[in-house]
Amino acid sequence: MSPFQRVRRYVACSLVAILLSFGLLPATPAAAAIPLIRSELNGLCIDIKDFSLPHGAPLQTWDCWGGAGQRWYWDGRLLRSELNGLCIDIKDANPARGALLQTWDCWGGASQRWYWDGRLLRSELNGLCIDIRDFRLPPGAPLQMWDCWGGAGQRWY
């Protein structure tokens, strides 16, 4: 991890600690295990870019460190972030291949409903799979929707 990445993580963790101490973020009980979603391609996790709280933050892969921006829980067919309670959403409800993923207010539309198909995470909007754009290995790769072909960049655990 580069010095810049360490500083960024330190600042993000400090911000969360401050927000938790003022009651501005909900604290999750330790017993409520919220899973990390890891890629079989590189072992990286689905992550909210820059630990961003507002809706519209892009999703990416990042080193798994277990922060709230990497922990997700099922709410019916919705995948919610522990960081801000927002849902994994296909940007602009775009049904096309290459549509990017973001966090957004949970409203339950097809662009926010997901289901497991083996190790693939499919969208109810279009049946496409969550995919690491361009099969990128390093941290920071954006997540997109693509035809389900079962490659390591589409398999999650």
Image: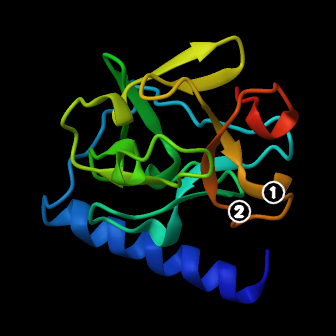
Q: Residue at 86% of width from left, 34% of height from top? A: 152
Quarter residue 25 falls in: bottom left
The image quadrant of residue 155 is: top right
Amino acid marked by disc 1: Asp
Residue for point 56% across, 54% down: 47
| Residue shown at the point (81%, 57%) measured from the top left | 134
From the viewer's perspective, is residue 122 above or below residue 130? above
Task: For the N terminus, give its image quadrant.
Answer: bottom right
In terms of secondary structure, where does tag 1 sit?
helix
Where does residue 7 sit, x and y in percent of width and height? 60, 85
* Of marks 2 and 1, the one in the foreground: 1
Query: Foreground: 55 or 110?
Result: 110
- Counting from the top left corner in percent of width and height, residue 49 is at 52, 66
Side of 63 where 28 appears, left or right: left
At a point 66% along the width and 47% down the height, the residue shown is 45
| Numbered marks: total | 2
As drawn, the residue found furthest toward the left would be 23
Q: Is residue 11 left or right of residue 146?
A: left
Badges 2 and 1: C-beta atoms under 8 Å apart? Answer: yes
Q: Is 65 drawn above or below residue 28 in the view shown?
A: below
Q: Position of residue 91 (x, y in %)?
A: 40, 53
**Residue annotated with mark 2:** 141
Horizontal side of residue 20 vs 34, given as left or right = left
Name the amino acid, label 2: Ala
Q: Position of residue 143 (x, y in %)?
A: 62, 52
The local crowd at label 1, few if under 14, some if 14 to 19, many if 20 or more residues have their Cα within 10 Å, is: few
Q: Which residue is mark 1?
A: 134
The furthest residue to the top: 118
